[in-house]
Image (cartoon, rainbow, N blue to C red):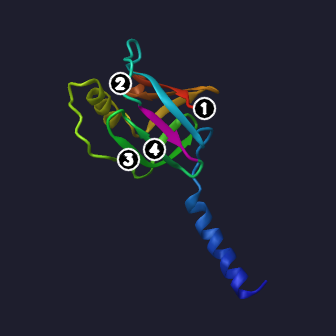
Amino acid sequence: MTLRQRTAMVCLMVLLPAGCRQTADLGETSWLLVSYGPVDAPFTPAGSPWISFDNNGRMAGSTGCNAFYGHYEADDGRIALRDNELAFTAMYCDPASPEGMQETFFRKGLGAIAYSQTEDSLWLYFDEGRQVAEYRLDDE
């Protein structure tokens, strides 16, 4: 093995773990919001909120008002955000409007959260399971 090949191999070995994130079954999926809010009385969403996850640990979505994006790790029924933060666009959302209420819900809830999923459904649990966001697989 030449010096150049050994150098490339060492660089790969150093960089590969940094780029790999545990993403469990969420990778390469996109979901449309069906309902959100209190577990016992969820609301119907306004606008077209969605969330997607890449195999490389990136996530993106929309609250129905603003877009968000960041990096995540998913393992053992939990989603954790890298550096505990997501970036949001800054469009004004009237807090009293349905979109504004969704915005507030997701800004407060997205973080280290629990989740469960089936083949075509995803549930995100916030506030120790008292709040939920239910998604359906976007197969388009």
Q: CA distance from mark 4 to mark 3?
A: 9 Å
Q: Is residue 66 left or right of residue 121?
A: left
Amino acid beneath label 4: Ala
Disc number placed over residue 139 in the picture, else none: 1
Q: CA distance from mark 1 to mark 2?
A: 20 Å
User: Furthest-top residue in view?
Assistant: 40
Amino acid beneath label 1: Asp
Residue displayed at 54% across by 37% down = 30
Secondary structure under the numbered disc 3 in the rendered image: loop
Q: CA distance from mark 2 to mark 4?
A: 18 Å
Return the disc, 4 or 3, that comes first in the chain's sequence: 4
In the displayed structure, 37 sits above or below 112; it is above
Report the front residue among 6 and 29: 29
Return the disc, 1 or 4, that comes first in the chain's sequence: 4
- Pair 1/4: label in front: 1
Dominant secondary structure of the magenta stretch? strand
Amino acid beneath label 2: Ala
Q: Residues within 10 Å of mark 3 (few under 14, many from 20)?
A: some
Residue displayed at 47% across by 37% down = 51
Q: Residues within 10 Å of mark 2 (few under 14, many from 20)?
A: some
Residue displayed at 37% across by 34% down = 63
User: Furthest-front residue in view?
Assistant: 140
- Residue 80 position in % (x across, y down): 47, 43
Residue under pointer 3: 86
Residue under pointer 2: 46
Secondary structure under the numbered disc 1 in the rendered image: loop
* Residue interval drawn in magenta: 49-54
Secondary structure under the numbered disc 4 in the rendered image: strand
